[in-house]
Image (cartoon, rainbow, N blue to C red):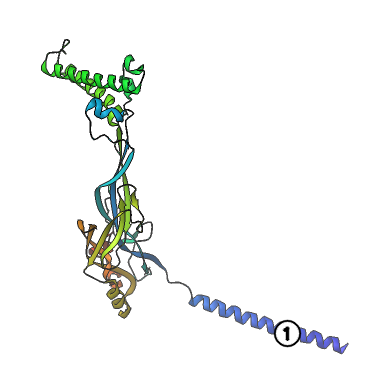
Amino acid sequence: MNTTKNRIVRILRVNHTAARLAALLLCCFVTLGMWAQPVEGTSYYLPQTAMKFTLMVEKSVYEPGELAGYAQRYMKMNDVKMEATTEHRIIDIKMNTFAQPDSAKHFTLILDKRTSISGIARTDDGILLAINAAPKTTTEPVPFQPARKPKALNPRDFMNEDILTAGSTAKMAQLIAQEIYDIRDSRNQLQRGQAEFMPKDGQQLRIMMDGLDTQERALRQMFEGVTTCDTTEVTIVYVPTKNVDRELFFRFSRHFGLVDNDDLAGVPYYITISAEGSADSEAENQGKEKKGKDDIGLMVNMPVKVLATLYRENKQVDRYEFNAGQFGTMESLSGALFGKKQTSKIVLNPLTGGIESIKEEVLE
């Protein structure tokens, strides 16, 4: 009986000790949780300035005519190509800058009762735009809209019965050539006023002349072939982070268009970046800065001018000047700007993260 009683006492003692230990651990966790509570604030990024190159690329597809082999014989055309070809060429290059979040510049703006911050404007991806003020707006480039293609001509729609029922390709070529010469003769007679049936006014004359031009153009396709042109927009994004000298940017082939940088079939395009500041010196200076009592985590970029030069092989294509936030330094703005007696309206440049304007206001 005593043995059973002693066992019960030991179990109660063990359970009591475990309960005290659990209570002590819970108290520690609650205390640590209180210390670990995050400071109330809003996170944001400063931007880095990126370059968006827009290439207008024209693609020309040539299909030889069915009667290309008779072009020299009947039409005296000596430069007609006999094989299909596809060619690409760059007809225009434009550059626009845009902002994207700089992952190395992620901060938290402290918001508490000491600050008079009533509104914060950020982009959808978290870039800080303004505090207590409306952000500066930017104008987006107008997107490219390809022109509507004219309806392709079908030469057979302009052939008479003799041409369509010709017994051989050579006979068809001969008849089409004669038809083209007749069209030219009719046009000359109209221009000279010697046609058998002259139009009554200038508008009717233009309609007749346009009809003859369309007929000739359609029939000439049987010899000359057809070239179809399409213009497309190709976008290349480049984010400058350091000075570079003639770095390989992209390659472009006359036969294949934009190709990989390691594809030697393409002509090389190079880019040179020259900035007044250095990202390395920026990081070094920021590491030496100490936070003051008025620090609320508000950082802004001090952008510098960047010169970018684009080359096609050894020939300069264009030069671009812009300001970039990833070069230069950053500055910390004091929380005193948002005190209890006065506040400030700050607007940042949406592309660089630099200060556009600061206006102080006295609080009533």
Q: Residue furthest left?
A: 192
Tell me the SS state at disc 1: helix
Query: Could you say which is closer to the camera, residue 19 or residue 249?
Result: 249
Q: Is residue 70 above or below residue 87?
A: above
Quarter in which the N terminus is drawn: bottom right
Horizontal relation, residue 15 to residue 243: left or right:
right
The part of the image, by quadrant, that contains residue 117 is bottom left
Q: Percent from the top left, x then y, of residue 289?
A: 30, 79
Horizontal relation, residue 110 to residue 277: left or right:
right
Query: Could you say which is closer to the camera, residue 83 or residue 244?
Result: 83
The part of the image, by quadrant, that contains residue 125 is bottom left
Q: Is residue 66 above or below residue 89?
A: above
Q: Percent from the top left, x then y, of residue 170?
A: 32, 23
Is residue 265 at all visible to an observer of this figure?
Answer: yes
Query: Could you say which is closer to the camera, residue 140 or residue 135?
Result: 140
Please state which amino acid type lies under the numbered disc 1: Val
Residue at point 30%, 61% (across, down):
248
Q: Percent from the top left, x then y, of residue 136?
A: 27, 56
Residue at point 31%, 69% (across, down):
299
Q: Residue furthest right?
A: 1
Is residue 110 at all visible to an observer of this figure?
Answer: no
In the rendered image, which residue does mark 1 sit on? 14
Q: Percent from the top left, x then y, of residue 322?
A: 22, 60
Q: Is residue 32 above or below residue 267?
A: below
Quarter in which the C terminus is drawn: bottom left
